[in-house]
Image: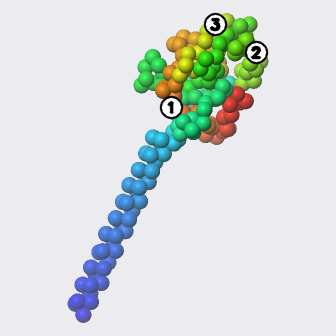
Amino acid sequence: MADTFESFSEKKEEKKTSIYRDILESIVIAVLLALIVRAFLFQPFYIPSGSMEPTLQINDEILVNKFGYRVWDLERGDIVVFKYPGDPSKDYVKRLIGLPGEKFELKNNKLYIDGQEISESYLPKDMRFNDFGPETVPEKAYLMLGDNRNNSEDSRYWGFLPQENVIGKAMFIFWPLDHMKILRSGGN
């Protein structure tokens, strides 16, 4: 009878150990998967300034696709998170306006690319901003501008964005809930 009792006790202890091991393994796997997803696929970012208003508001939180832009080319109008060229420890978010080799100009509150006026439906109708350019976007670089042109430190101040500084493309606003929306190229 003592043997049976000890056997039962040992099995109970083994079962307890097995449950703890299973829980620990599950936690480790979940943490590793979360780190992989954040490092290579998707990452949340917080918006600390008004440089992208009205599209992105102060305190909005966005989810950025870090993989897709490596497969598909970025397009004019995409909202992009990148390492700030002046201090790569800082992340910035701006709208991609000019692609490599394009000649751009801001004139009379309008954007011109290669001499053609480009509609910017995401800007407030009454937005007024200073003329800038014409300049040509170098190869392997982008022209990045904030939607709030009068309150944005962007390519007009620090130059063109090297392509290798791109972190990813903003996909949607997930917080606060009343701002939740998908971010589309040029049509936000």
Label 1 element class: strand
Mark 2 / mark 1, whichever is N-terminal: 2
CA gap between label 1 and label 3 equals 27 Å
The N terminus lies in quadrant = bottom left
Give the distance between the C-alpha atoms of the residues marked 2 and 1, in whole angstroms: 29 Å
* Nearest the eye: 163 or 25: 163
Q: Nearer the viewer, residue 93 or 74?
A: 74
User: Vertical placement of 144 versus 32: above or below?
Assistant: above
Which residue sits at x=67%, y=10%? Answer: 105
Say which element carries label 3: strand
- Would you say residue 130 is visible in this rendering? no
Residue drawn at (61%, 12%) of the image: 136
Q: Which mark is residue 133?
A: 3
Residue 83 vs 174, above or below: the answer is above
Residue 132 sits in quarter: top right
Residue drawn 34% across and 74% down?
Answer: 15
Q: Is residue 109 above or below residue 18?
A: above
Report the front residue among 27 and 162.
Answer: 162
In the foreground, 118 or 38: 118
Tell me whether the residue at label 2 lies in contact with that at label 3, contact meaning CB atoms closer than 8 angstroms.
Answer: no
Residue at 68% in and 10% down: 106
Mark before the other along the chain sequence, 2 or 3:
2
Which dot marks residue 155? none
Mark count: 3
Residue placed under numbered mark 2 in the picture? 117
Q: Which mark is residue 167?
A: 1
Residue 125 at least partly seen: yes
> Mark 3 packing: few (<14 Cα in 10 Å), some, or many (20+)?
few
**Other residues around mark 1 within 10 Å, as few (<14) / some (14–19) / many (≥20):** many
Q: Position of residue 103 (x, y in %)?
A: 65, 13
Q: Residue furthest left?
A: 2
Kindly identify the amino acid type of the residue bearing the numbered disc 3: Gly
